[in-house]
Image (tube, helix red, strand yellow):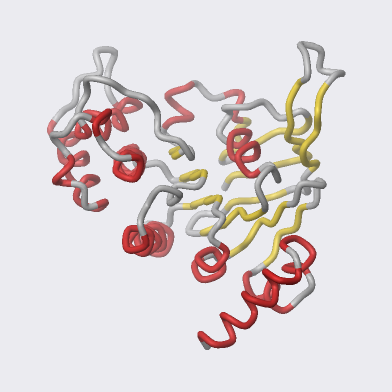
Amino acid sequence: MITLKGVSTGYKINKSQKSCRIVHSLPDLKINAGEMICLIGMNGSGKSTLIRTICRLQTPLNGSVYIDDANVNSLSDKALSKKIGVVLSTPPDIDNITANDVVAMGRYPYTGIFGKLNEIDYNIVTASIHDIGIEKLSDKLFSELSDGEKQKVMIAKTLCQQTPYIMMDEPMAFLDYSSRIEMSKLLQMLTSKMNKAVLLSTHNLELAIEMADKLWVMNTSGGFVECTPGKLLTSSLLADYFGSDTANWLTQHFRFEK
């Protein structure tokens, strides 16, 4: 599991640790195998900051992040890359390389010093491309793809990495409706059948409530709560964190769905 102990997220204002802006001081948290956690909150609530902190892309201002009892700071880059796959909200700018080659970069932690892929690696690349349904994009230059297509390629790269933990920051932001449904089914398959742990930030509250095992809810004032989708819908939390209009609409929506 991934464990957060006494973690405060935020930013250093300058090089001095004494001068910093704390975004959230979090309770102790765990991400378990086979679990889908959706991280929800308004813009500016600190969702991306939390994901970046867990992935060691950002240093916690206080506390520590552990993966299977090892402090993330004690792991080499390759060792960490075998544990956590990351999909950020904005696809990277990569020129003169095909989508297939970008997906194959997910095998980096498993290759030798020259980065040469073997037959097993190539089979995993092919399977990852198939699982995401991007065979038609495989030979196209990554730089020529749409934002939505790029994001699908980055998700395939993460699958190719074969990590037990996957962190995703708004991975469906650029996907059309049908692609979002396909992606949600894939993510649920990863947790239920492959026992992977997925932490996913999203603005799509309906999707989060429908597919999450747990919700991490944040606000811009440093508020944080961990709850189930059912508790969010049947308590004051929804109105407290998203406003009464959003709460009324969602509760009516899910009452109608039932």
Looking at the image, residue 173 lies above or below residue 215: above
Does 113 sit above or below residue 244?
above
Residue 185 figure quarter: bottom left
Looking at the picture, tell me which residue is in the foreground, 187 or 207: 207
Residue in the foreground of this view, choosing between 19 and 127: 19
User: In x, y percent, where is residue 149?
Assistant: 29, 43
Residue drawn 19% across and 50% down? Answer: 130
Residue 72 in view, yes or no: yes
For this rendering, which residue is in front, 239 or 11? 239
* Residue 1 left/right relative to 24: left
Left or right of 20 in this view: 47:
left
The number of numbered badges drawn on the structure is 0
Position in image of residue 49 (x %, y %): 64, 36
The reply to whether residue 84 is visible in this rendering is no
Q: Residue at x 63, y 31 (%)?
A: 71
Eyeballing the image, is 108 above or below 54?
A: above
Residue drawn at (16%, 38%) of the image: 138
Q: Residue at x 55, y 34 (%)?
A: 55
Corner quadrant of residue 237: bottom right
Q: Residue furthest front?
A: 245
Residue 207 rendering spot, x and y as whole percentages: 50, 65
Task: State the image coordinates of residue 111 (x, y, percent, origin top left).
Answer: 27, 23
